[in-house]
Image (tube, rainbow, N blue to C red):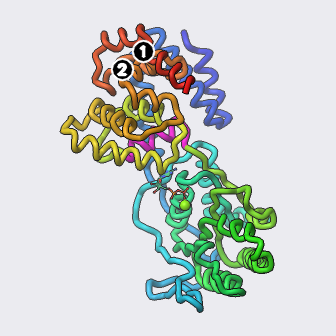
Amino acid sequence: MEHFPVVQSIIRAALVGDRQALDKQIARLRERLEKSGQTKEVATLDRLLASVSDTHEMAPSRVEVSRAQIVGERITPDVNPPIDRETGARLCSIEFPANTNSQPVYGDSVQEAIEGLLQEWVSAEALKSVGVEPTRSLLIYGPPGSGKTVTAHYISRRLNLPLITARIDGLISSFLGTTARNIANLFDFANRYACILLLDEFDALAKLRDDPQEIGEIKRVVNTLLQNLDQRRNYGITIAITNHDRLLDPAVWRRFETHVHIGEPELRAREQLIARFLQPIKVEASTSRIFSYCLEGRSGADLERICASVKRTLALSGEAHDGPGVFHALSTVLARSPFHDHVAARILATDQEAFISLIANDPDFLIKQTDIGEATGYGQSRISDLKKAKRHLALMEAGHAQ
Ligand SMILES: Nc1ncnc2c1ncn2[C@@H]1O[C@H](COP(=O)(O)OP(=O)(O)O)[C@@H](O)[C@H]1O
Ligand SMILES: [Mg+2]
C-alpha cells in the first residue's frame, strides 16, 4: 500500500488522541494523494473533513448541572439589579441564557479547556467521589475582539444559568468608599441567586492603581474584591475577563482556579469564522481559505467587521454572490483601508493579480490551481501565467522598502 507510513502515523495519532498530530498527518496524506494525482481520493478526504468541521459547528447540548452544586434562588425577570446609591446607576446587568445555537470558534487548546470545564460540571458527582469540586472560577484573558465576552455567554447557555455581568468601571465611584460598597453589594446579590457572575473588563481596576491620588482607595477596593472572591467560592461560578493580563494584581490572578488565554484565531478557526460571518452568502471552502490566508493576525471581531463590509460592498456592486464576487469585494474593502500589517492583505489591496501570483507561489499555502480559479474567477491559463510572472515579488520588495 503506497501511503501506508502516513496511514500508520494517522492511526497512531488517533489512538493516543493527539488531535494536532492527527490533523497534521491527515494534511500530509492529502498532500501525498494530491501529488500522485489521486484527485478522487483527495475529494473524498475533503468531504470527510468538511463534514467533521460541520459537526464541530453544531451546537452541543446543554450541560445538565446538578442543582445541588449551585446554591441560590432562581432569578426571575422581575428581579432588579443592585444600584449605586449615589448615582442610581445599575451595578450589573442580568441576562438569561439565549436560545441560540451559535458556538464560539476556538483553536484546539481553548476548545479543550472550555469543554473540559463544562464536563466537570456534568461529572460533578464523579469529582466529588475523589474529594474535589468542579472549577468555580475562571479568568479569560487575551486581545480585544477575540471572543472572551461571547465565551462567557456561551458558558452561561451551556450551563443554563443566568449571567450577571458587572463592568468594573461601572462599580468604580467617584465617592470615597462607595466603590468598595458597590463591590460588596454586587457579590451579595450574585451569591443570593443561582447564576454565573461575570466581571468583564477587569483591567479597569489596574487603571485605578495608576492614579497616585487613589492609593488608599485602591487598597480598600482590591481588599474588598479579594475577600468577596474568596467567599464567592461557596456560592457559584465566577468568570473574570481582561485584555491586559499583565496589569492584574497577582493576588487577584491567584484567586482564579483556571486561566484561559484566547488569542487571535488560527488559520482553520479563521476559515470557520469567515464562512459564518459571510452568511447568508454561502461560499466554497476555497473562498474561506483564501480569505483566511489574507486575514492572518486579525481578531474574530475584525473578521466579523470585514465580512460585513464585504457583504455591503458586494450587495451594491451588482456582482454575483459567489466566490469571485466576494473576492472582488474583499479586495475593494482592503483597498479602502490605508494600512495593513500583513503582506497578503497589502498585496490584495493593491493588485488582485499580484495576489493570485502570491498564493500560487507560496509553498506554505497548499491550494490547488482549480481552487484559486473557483474562488477568484480567473481562468487556469491566466493563473499559470501570473504564477510564472511572479507579479507579487515587486510589491513585496516595495513593502520592505517602506
Ligand atoms: N472566537 C470567536 N468565535 C465567535 N465569534 C467571535 C470570536 N471572536 C470574536 N467573535 C465575534 O467578535 C465579536 C466580539 O467578540 P467579544 O467576545 O465581544 O470580544 P472580546 O474578546 O473583546 O470580549 C463577537 O460579537 C463575535 O461575533
Ligand atoms: Mg469583551
Answer with the quadrant where ligand 2 appears in the image.
Answer: bottom right
- Residue type at tag 1: Arg
Say if mark 2 contacts mark 1, CB within 8 Å: yes
Q: Residue at x 76, y 76 (%)?
A: 213
Q: Which residues, given as a range, are shown in magenta?
A: 265-277
Q: Front-most of 147 and 101?
A: 147
Q: Residue furthest bottom?
A: 85
Does any portion of residue 18 appear in the rendered image? yes
Q: Residue at x 55, y 78 (%)?
A: 92
Does any portion of residue 41 appear in the rendered image? no
377 relative position to 389: left or right:
left
Q: Front-most of 396 and 128?
A: 396
Residue 276 lies in the magenta-colored region: yes
Quarter of the view holding residue 377: top left
Quarter of the view holding residue 132: bottom right
- Mark 2–mark 1 Cα distance, whole angstroms, equals 7 Å
Q: Residue at x 21, y 35 (%)?
A: 320
Q: Position of residue 206 (x, y in %)?
A: 71, 66
The answer to whether 40 is drawn above or below residue 15 in the figure is above
143 relative position to 271: left or right:
right
Q: Secondary structure at mark 1?
A: loop
Residue 311 lies in the magenta-colored region: no
Disc on res. 391: 1
Q: How many residues crowd mark 1 within 10 Å: few (<14), some (14–19), many (20+)?
A: some
Q: Position of residue 14 (x, y in %)?
A: 62, 32
- Residue type at tag 2: Glu
Disc on res. 353: 2
Q: Secondary structure at mark 2?
A: helix
